[in-house]
Image (spheres, coloured by chain):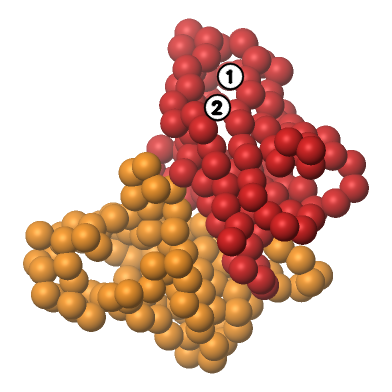
Chain colours: A orange, B red
């Protein structure tokens, strides 16, 4: 079982370019999340999805969009990348049963540099 | 709004020594609290979680944490640190409803021989 896969592993991108970070999970989790990790700031939630077909904004959604066409995939798109979006991006997923907060499972991350 | 504070950015301990990582939270009701660990170049992994009940929670890799409501704290402890424990540790609180959590800024642990 792979868990969560993210692609690419790393990417250098020119400012103004469009970029999609891919995330796929094989655990059939309903909820999925995108975080960015920056030095001294910890992890900040960008967007989330509680189930296929629904998405929501997190703490830092500006400049990012997501879609959730099916349970397994949750791509993150930067429509026009800016240098401040240089970061390490983590995708995560969790179950939604039990009515409480469940463990989140994280992918290995994508290191993105915007020049 | 819910928040988590990890006052120590970096901690260095000797192998075999005890460890305590501090976490303070701000939340109006009974919090859902977590500790995650991130090894270099990896994603985060859950160490332990607290929802209710016994305030001393046991986790994986020999870690434990104690919930103290009066101090709004959820400190992580380990009696004897191993070199493989060198990593970054994140405290988190369930926030904003329905599965969303807020992470602290992390504490990086260095273990010296």
Q: In the picture shown, does residue B1 fall above or below B33? A: below
Q: Is residue B91 left or right of residue A44?
A: right
For this rendering, which residue is in front, B35 or B9?
A: B9
Circle 2 SS class: helix
Circle 1 SS class: loop
Residue at x-position 62% and y-position 20%: B19
Q: In the picture shown, does residue A53 fall above or below A18? A: below
Answer yes or no: do the residues labelled 2 and 1 have beta carbons within 8 Å? yes
Q: Which residue is mark 1?
A: B82
Residue at x-position 18% and y-position 77%: A80
Q: Which residue is mark 2?
A: B85
Q: Is residue A82 left or right of residue B60?
A: left
Residue at x-position 11% and y-position 75%: A16
Can residue A103 be seen in the rendering of this structure?
no
Can residue B16 be seen in the rendering of this structure?
yes
Q: In the picture shown, does residue B51 fall above or below B1? A: above
Report crowding for label 1: few under 14, some 14 to 19, many 20 or more residues within 10 A (C-alpha). Answer: some
Q: In the picture shown, does residue B35 fall above or below A17? A: above
Q: Is residue A78 left or right of residue B104?
A: left
Position of the N terminus of chain B by quadrant: bottom right
Q: Are marks 2 and 1 on the same chain?
A: yes
Mark 2 and mark 1: span between their CA atoms?
5 Å
Q: Position of residue A35 (x, y in %)?
A: 43, 62
Residue at x-position 81% and y-position 70%: A98
Q: Is residue A14 left or right of residue A2?
A: left
Q: Residue furthest right?
A: B53
Q: How many marks?
A: 2
């Amino acid at each position: 079982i792979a868990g969560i896969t993210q692609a690419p592993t790393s990417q250098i991108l020119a400012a103004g370019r469009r970029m999609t970070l891919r995330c796929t999970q094989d655990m059939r989790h309903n909820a999925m999340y995108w975080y960015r990790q920056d030095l001294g700031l910890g992890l900040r939630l960008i967007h989330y999805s509680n189930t296929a077909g629904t998405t929501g904004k997190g703490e830092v959604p500006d400049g990012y969009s997501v879609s959730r066409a099916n349970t397994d995939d949750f791509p993150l798109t930067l429509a026009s990348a800016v240098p401040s979006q240089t970061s390490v991006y983590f995708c995560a997923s969790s179950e939604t049963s039990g009515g409480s907060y469940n463990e989140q499972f994280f992918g290995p991350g994508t290191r993105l540099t915007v020049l | 709004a819910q928040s988590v504070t990890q006052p120590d950015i970096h901690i260095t301990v000797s192998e075999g020594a005890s460890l305590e990582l501090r976490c303070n939270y701000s939340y109006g009701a009974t919090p859902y609290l977590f500790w995650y660990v991130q090894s270099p170049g990896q994603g985060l992994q859950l160490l332990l979680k607290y929802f209710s009940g016994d305030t001393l929670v046991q986790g994986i890799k020999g870690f434990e944490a104690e919930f103290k409501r009066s101090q709004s704290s959820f400190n992580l402890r380990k009696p004897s640190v191993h070199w493989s424990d060198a990593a970054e540790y994140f405290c988190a609180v369930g926030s904003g409803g329905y599965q969303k959590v807020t992470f602290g800024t992390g504490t990086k642990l260095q273990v010296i021989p």
